Amino acid sequence: MLRLKPVLIAVFALIGVSAAPFSAWADLCPEVFTGKPSSTIARQPRLIILSAPSGGGKTTLANMLIKDFPDIILSVSSTTRAPRGQERNGVDYHFLSVEEFKSKIAQGGFAEWAQVHGNYYGTEIRTIKNAFAKGQSVLALVDVHGADKLRRSFPGEIFTIFISPPDLATLEKRLRARGTDSDETIQLRLSNAKKEMDEARRFDKMIINDDLRRAYLELKELIQGQQSAY
Ligand code: ADP
Ligand code: 5GP
C-alpha cells in the first residue's frame, strides 16, 4: 500500500483530482488498496523475541500469548540444564546432555546458542525455517546474547521485546515464590539480571512486568501491530 499510494496520488494529480481526500481515505482504509479483505492479507512472518532476566515473567507472558495467537509457533529451546518442577521434555525444553548439545552445534542445528547461568541453551533453526515456510511467526524466549545473534541472522524479520521486572527486589521475591531454584541458583540469576537489564535499550520495545494483566495487554497490542504489519 505504501508504495502504491504515491503512484496513485501522482496519477490523480495528473488527471486533476485532489490527492487530499485520497490520502486521508488510504490512511483510514488501507485494506481497500490491497485488493483483498483484511482477514486474508498475507502477513510477513516474524521472529518475535522475548528476553527477560530469569524470573522476569517471559514464560508466563509467552504462555498467555500463544493462547491468544494460535498461529504463532512457540520455539521449544534445547538446554543442558536439568528439568525443574513440572517441566516436560519436548514441551518446556528439549533436555539434552552436553555431548548431545555440542553435537547439535557441530551439525549446524541451532540458529543461535549461548551459555547462560552455566548451562547451554539454543534455538533450533528448523523451528524457524518450518514456521516461516508456512507463513507463520515464531516466538522465541532467549537471553540477551541469543537476541543479538538472531538480530544479525534475521534482520528485517525480527521483533525484539525486553520484559523487565519492576525492580531487583521484586525479581528476587518472584524467583523465591516460584520455588524451583536453589538459593545458589537464585543468587547467580540475580547477579546476571543486573547485566541483562543494562541491555534492555538494545531491544525494539520494553515492557515493565509489574501488573501482569497490564503487561500482557501491552504485549498483546505490540504483537497485534506486528501481525498486521506487512
Ligand atoms: P521467566 O520465564 O522469565 O523466568 P516466569 O514466567 O517463570 O519467569 O515468572 C517467574 C515467577 O513470577 C512465576 O512464578 C510467575 O508466576 C511470577 N510472575 C510473573 N509475572 C508476574 C507478575 N506480574 N506479578 C506477580 N508474579 C508474576
Ligand atoms: P531458565 O533456565 O530460567 O529456563 O532460562 C534461563 C535463561 O536462558 C533465560 O534468560 C532464558 O531466556 C535463556 N534461554 C532459554 N532458552 C534459550 C535459548 O534457546 N537461547 C538462548 N540464548 N537463551 C535461552
Image (cartoon, rainbow, N blue to C red):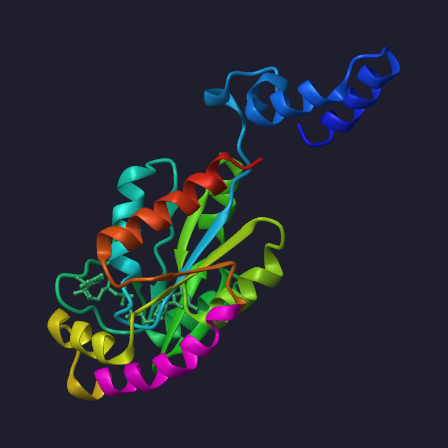
Q: Is residue 87 left or right of residue 72?
A: left
For residue 15: magenta?
no
Q: Is residue 92 left or right of residue 107?
A: left
Residue visible at 27% across and 52% down in the picture: 214
| Quadrant hosting residue 19 | top right
Camera-nearest residue between 142 and 102: 142
* Outermost residue toward the right in this view: 14
The magenta segment: 186-201
Is 84 rendered above or below residue 213? below
**Residue 43 screen position, x and y as percent:** 53, 33
**Residue 5 screen position, x and y as percent:** 72, 26
Is 222 rendered above or below residue 56? above
Q: Is residue 166 visible?
A: yes
Is 179 rendered above or below residue 212? below
Prevalent SS, magenta region: helix
Residue visible at 61% across and 62% down in the picture: 152
**Residue 227 screen position, x and y as percent:** 47, 38
Q: How many marks can you see? A: 0
**Residue 81 screen position, x and y as percent:** 28, 74
Camera-nearest residue between 6 and 100: 6
Q: Is residue 23 left or right of residue 151?
A: right
Camera-nearest residue between 103 and 1: 1
Instruction: Specify the quadrant that holds the N terminus.
Output: top right
Residue visible at 34% across and 55% down in the picture: 76
Residue visible at 55% across and 66% down in the picture: 149
For residue 199: magenta?
yes
On the rendering, which quadrant does ligand 2 occupy? Answer: bottom left
| Quadrant hosting residue 87 | bottom left
